Image (cartoon, rainbow, N blue to C red):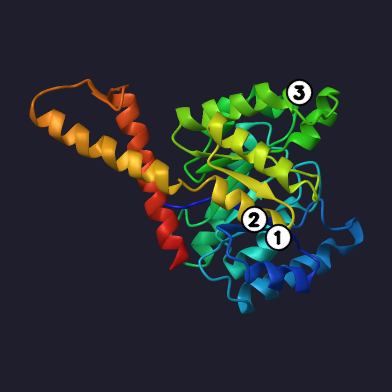
Amino acid sequence: MTQLRRALLFSPGDNEKKIAKAANIKVDSIIIDLEDAVAPNKKVEARSIVVEALSKLDFGPSERLIRINSNNSDTQYQDIWETAAAQPDGYVVPKAEESQQIDHISQVLTEIEYKQKQEIGSYKILPLIETAKGIVNIHSIAQANDRIDAIIFGAEDLATDIGAYRSRDNLEILYARSAIVIAAAAYGIQSIDTVHTRLNELDELKTDSDLARQLGFDGKLAIHPNQVDIIQKTFTPSPSEIEYAQLIMSSFSKNELLDIGVFELNGQMIDMPIVEAAKRTLAKASLARRSMN
């Protein structure tokens, strides 16, 4: 893992002030939205606003992503061609349903990189899985292209697509969440959880973020600046988790010298899966510390 993505904050692409505000927030990733947040008659103007913002604003260490319009619109490729000159870090592809969609976008990005004399593969692609077809094809999408290093879950559109009723316990999206986490893990990429839409329910956001982390997600989408701190803290290893991971690694090193593969630590059996989990914890903690500098 080289890019920490605990919280990914959406910002509407047609609002200069909100983009500027997002740029000043300490958040791992910012997604400037050209899709749902922008009215159809403002799409062209929004692209110009995004290019200017990316060219002039200092986003600090935050990753700069653009959510383009969906494959069913006429504006998807225009979004890419007209914003690539500002050199975002990558593109979020909504309603990703087939690997061919990703390949076509990658071909466009390769052409742009060639023309701009950039390294091929500079632009990342983050597919947003938010339809039944996307869930069914999740494995082919996750491994569709080398540009992909994360997949994102969108629960609201999926619920509409399958006719599910959204609930506070989120049981209706448990299968989809698990499918995305497993596919991401299988192909060595990150998984990002869906938005929490009840803006004033911050305790509920914490509970939902805890569940997402428990399921295996690496981070979560945010739709309001007030959500960022809760999400980022949830997906950052706590001091006690770091301390225990360090203890595991220290004990593992000592036992390894004695050719002991499985050992007991504080009443818990420690074997290689637990050692690997401790390594991941320490790696995430290291990235989190660097992001604060």
Q: Secondary structure at mark 3?
A: helix
Vertical comparison of 47 with 152: above or below: below
Can residue 108 be seen here? The reply is no
Give the image location of residue 213, x and y in percent: 56, 36
Q: CA distance from mark 1 to mark 3?
A: 27 Å
Q: What's under tag 3, amino acid-wise?
A: Glu
Q: Residue at x 65, y 49 (%)?
A: 92
Residue that sits furthest to the left in the current view: 258
Splitting the image into 4 quarters, where does residue 243 fall? top left
- Sequence-wise, the earlier of marks 3 and 2 is 3
Q: What's under tag 2, amino acid-wise?
A: Val
In contact (CB < 8 Å): disc 2 and disc 1: yes
Residue where numbered disc 2 is placed: 228
Q: Is residue 221 left or right of residue 114?
A: right
Give the image location of residue 146, x and y in percent: 47, 42
Residue where numbered disc 1 is placed: 225
- Sequence-wise, the earlier of marks 1 and 3 is 3
Q: Is residue 88 left or right of residue 257?
A: right
Give the image location of residue 263, x and y in percent: 22, 22
In contact (CB < 8 Å): disc 1 and disc 3: no
Vertical comparison of 69 with 211: above or below: below
Residue where numbered disc 3 is placed: 172
Q: Residue at x 73, y 40 (%)?
A: 204
Q: Nearer the viewer, mark 3 or mark 2?
A: 2
Q: Nearer the viewer, residue 278 or 109?
A: 278
Q: Secondary structure at mark 2?
A: helix
Q: Nearer the viewer, residue 221 or 93?
A: 221
Residue that sits furthest to the front in the current view: 266
